[in-house]
Amino acid sequence: MSNKQATLAPRTDVTPPRIASPTPRVNATQTAIDAEVVGPSEEVGISREEDSQLNPSHPTQVAARATAGVIVLTWLGTGDDRIEYYRVYRKIANDEDWQLTARVEATGDNRGWYEFRDTATERGITYIYGVSAVNAYGNESTISGSPAITSQ
């Protein structure tokens, strides 16, 4: 084994690599605010604010049937996943004023059938029922009415 030590001399025929300067940090919020918008937005749909101003779709296929001491009201859900609950209204046939009778929570995908059983009716009185949908913003649809039904 040799005791010689090798010495390395710097090479003068090679250009050292360029090291890029670090990328400056950018405040993303500031960049977004300062960005120039060119052309129409690619966003699809409506804003949350616009959505909060819309009334939901009303329930369909509202029907009522009378059995001994009970009127059974049924309707088809709107299919709108933003519906929180349904309001059930009742009025006497020749009356103009709806009376809020019940609140029925929306369930699942809101595409199925709903049912409300009214046991607080008087025998021989003719009623009309209505159902409306209420969304998460508290907006209420128009009332979908049932045909008149006489309590037994």
Image (tube, rainbow, N blue to C red):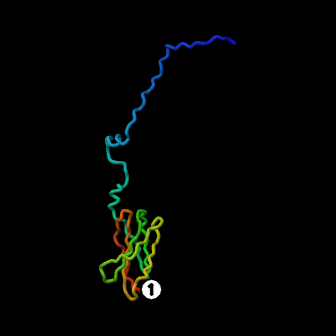
Q: Residue 65's x, y, as percent?
A: 43, 82
- The residue shown at (36%, 78%) is 90
- Asked where in the image residue 9 lies, by quadrant, the reply is top right
User: Residue placed at 45% from the left, 23% from the top?
Assistant: 18
Residue 20, quarter of picture: top left
SS assignment at label 1: loop
Q: Is residue 93 left or right of residue 1?
A: left
Q: In which quarter of the image is the C terminus?
A: bottom left
Looking at the image, the residue that sits furthest to the right is 1
Residue positioned 41% across, 74% down in the render: 61
Residue type at numbered disc 1: Gly
Residue 1, above or below 64: above
Quadrant in which residue 48 is drawn: bottom left
Residue tagged 1: 69
Residue 82, percent from left and from top = 41, 62
Please identify the quadrant where the N terminus is shown: top right
x, y percent for residue 101: 38, 77
Q: Position of residue 95 (x, y in %)?
A: 30, 82
| 7, 19: nearer the viewer | 7
Q: Considering only vertical position in the picture, is 14 above or below 88?
A: above
